[in-house]
Image (cartoon, rainbow, N blue to C red):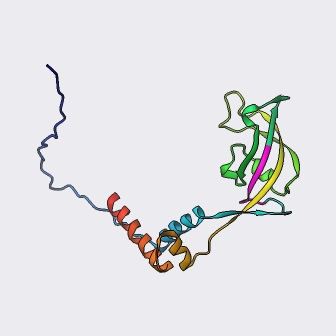
Amino acid sequence: SYKVRLEVKPNPELQNLEGIDVTRPVVRITDDDVDRFVEMERQRRAQFVPVDDVAAVMGNVALLDIKATSDGAALDWATLDGRWIELSPDTSSFPGLPEAIVGMKPGDEREIPLSLGDGVPKGFAGKPALFNVKLKEIKERKLPVLDDEFARDIGGFETLASLREDVRKRLQAVAKQKV
């Protein structure tokens, strides 16, 4: 013998629905919406090109060796060897570190005092730390040109205009589904 449990759809009885106003929101896809989507695709297809003898700037990607200490003790969880880090304030696990790397050139070393932020192991948040940073390599983001060739590469579209029209249709379909 066995026991079976089945879910069945209920048959609700609708009460009087008169007097209830329901409005369907109107969603309009603007040129800005299409531009944002196309720019996201462009950013995703960016290449990182090595640059020589140039100081690091925000937006670069840097190959770093980092050794961190706090109160004289090594912070193993904050030690990174040969790690690529995008120099952007919102991508760093250590607030203030990307800004302190700006201006360094490959081969430069710098000691950077920082306060540890949230997102670090328990008991370390807010503590002072010293980061010994060695910059090994810098790459800059090279975005593809927004033209018909980009449209062909992204999805076989003949022109940038046809890509934009397809993006508009897909965004409208998603918006319609949400409504």
Q: Give me the residue at 84% from left, 47% from top.
A: 134
Asked where in the image residue 42 lies, by quadrant, the reply is: bottom right
Image coordinates of residue 33 in percent, x first then y, are: 48, 68
Q: Which quadrant of the figure contains the C terminus?
A: bottom left
Q: Is residue 61 magenta?
A: yes
Q: Give me the residue at 16% from left, 21% from top.
A: 2
Count of marks overlaid on the render: 0
Image coordinates of residue 128 in percent, x first then y, are: 80, 35
Q: Give me the residue at 76% from left, 51% from top.
A: 63
Q: Give me the residue at 82% from left, 51% from top.
A: 135
Asked where in the image residue 40 lies, by quadrant, the reply is: bottom right
Q: Which quadrant of the figure contains the N terminus?
A: top left
Image coordinates of residue 174 in percent, x first then y, are: 37, 62
Name the side, left or right, on which 163 lies relative to 113.
left
Query: Viewer-proximal residue, 173 or 140?
Result: 140
Name the side, left or right, on which 5 lies relative to 110.
left
Asked if residue 163 is positioned above or below residue 70 in the image, the reply reads below
Query: Viewer-proximal residue, 118 or 41?
Result: 41
- Residue 72 at least partly seen: yes
Asked if residue 128 is positioned above or below residue 159 in the image, the reply reads above
Range drawn in magenta: 57-65
Image coordinates of residue 68 in percent, x first then y, are: 80, 36
Q: Is residue 116 magenta?
A: no
- Residue 179 at least partly seen: no
